[in-house]
Image (cartoon, grey):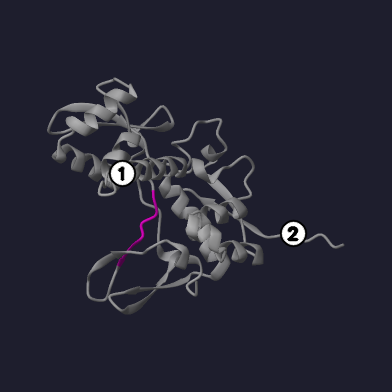
Amino acid sequence: MSEFKFPTEEVELPSKGLIYPKDHPLSSGKVEVKYMTAKEEDILSNQAYIQKGVVLDKLLDSVIVSKNVDHRDLIIGDKNAVLIATRILGYGKEYKFSRDGKEITVDLNDFENVDFDEEKIIDNKNEFSFNLPFSNTDITYKLLTGRDEKKIDAEIKGIQRINKDANPELSTRLKFMILSINGDTEKKTIREFVDNYLLARDSRALRDEIRYTQPDVDLRYTLDSGEEVTVPIGLNFFWPDL
């Protein structure tokens, strides 16, 4: 039987690999992905994966061919870059989505990686320092990975099983992001701080800091009306007919 080889491309990560340990394969700042095939279309249309919310994870498991790279280790911005590249390789650069009943077409090649402050990175790892401006509290924080997102989702679902009206997404995410409070790395201290002492103004300042400095792909798009929107990445991003 003939041996078939599939073409691959290297994806440049927005983080440049700088937030991963030097001995980690992602420290190269690149991820090799293969072109999508009928196998990946089967994954995208798998109803069990869709209902469980794991379809994009299964897709990345299939297309990433870099040795020893697990997409769950990618920070969200780097994961976005891999997803966009996979979409372009699978179905082309043109992407259509709806906004207020109107169909909008964008060229995915036009979206560039966001510049970020490399000096904020501590010791070439996923750790950043920030001073909460209103309480004058020094913290360190991390950027969430796919693995973190799964843990956050599981914790929120656990809380909502006890109290169905609870909506602790913001505080739960902060508990996973913050690594230390004035040098104290105890999980109990961090959780207590978020629940009882983190000022709303400081919370917003931290979220703004992360939003404007984290490595990512700039998915903002300006409509003809002048309104700025963020291009959505979901299941329909890969296969609008689904």
Q: Identify the residue at the far front of this view.
A: 162
Residue count near mark 1 (Cα–Cα under 10 Å), binned few <14, some 14–19, many ≥20? some
Q: What whole-number distance in Å separates the C-alpha atoms at marks 1 and 2?
A: 39 Å
Of residues 71 and 218, the one drawn nearer to the viewer in this rendering? 71
Above or below for 130 versus 69: above
Tell me the kind of residue under disc 2.
Lys
Q: Would residue 181 be counted in the magenta stretch?
A: no
**Residue type marked 1:** Thr
Seen from this angle, which residue lies furthest bottom?
A: 102
Q: Position of residue 98 (x, y in %)?
A: 35, 74
In terms of depth relative to the viewer, which is nearer, 55 or 231?
A: 55
**Foreground: 122 or 177?**
177
Q: Compared with residue 138, is residue 63 higher up or lower down, i.e. above or below?
A: below
Instruction: Provide the secondary structure element on which disc 2 rests.
Output: loop
Tell me the magenta residue range: 216-221
Q: Position of residue 223 (x, y in %)?
A: 28, 72
Residue under label 2: 5
In the displayed image of the protein, which residue is found farthest to the right?
Answer: 1
Where residue 89 sits, quadrant-wise, is bottom right
Magenta segment, prevailing SS (helix, strand or loop): loop
Residue 129: image quadrant is top left
Task: Say which mark, if any, is on residue 196.
Answer: none
Q: Is residue 220 magenta?
A: yes
Residue assigned mark 1: 213
Q: Is residue 43 above or below residue 122?
A: below
